Amino acid sequence: MNNIWYKTILFGLLLMLILAPFAGFAPLLLVVLIAGVGWFFSSILRVLIFGESEPKSDRSN
C-alpha cells in the first residue's frame, strides 16, 4: 500500500472523476485509449517482425 505508483494512479482517477465533464466515462475512455494505442503498436510490430499483416493462403484461383 506504500507504493507511490498505486497512490498516483488512484489520485489521478479521483481527479478525473471530479473534474471531467462526463466523469463516469473518463476512466472508460482512458482504458479505450490505452487499448487502442496497444492495438496500433502491436499491429506495427507484427508487420515488422513477421513481414506480413495476414498470412497468405496457398490456394490460387
Image (spheres, grey):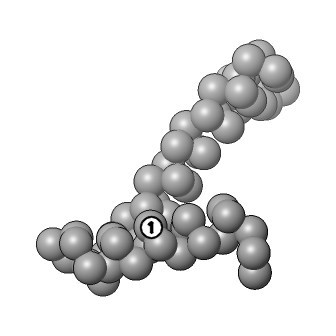
Q: How many marks?
A: 1
Residue 7 left/right relative to 51 = left
Residue 26 left/right relative to 31 = left
SS under mark 1? helix
Residue 7 left/right relative to 23 = right
Seen from the viewer's position, the closer of residues 1 and 27 is: 1
Quarter of the view holding residue 38: top right
Q: Is any part of residue 40 visible from this angle? A: yes
Query: Looking at the picture, how far across and down is residue 53, in whole percent?
Result: 67, 28
Vertical comparison of 47 with 10: above or below: above
Quarter of the view holding residue 20: bottom left
Q: Which residue: 32% across, 79% down?
A: 17
Q: Which residue is mark 1?
A: 12
Q: Which residue: 56% across, 65% down?
A: 8
Q: Quadrant of the N terminus?
A: bottom right
- Badge 1 local density, few (<14 within 10 Å), some, or many (20+)? few
Three-letter code for the amino acid on which mark 1 is drawn: Gly
Vertical comparison of 39 with 32: above or below: above
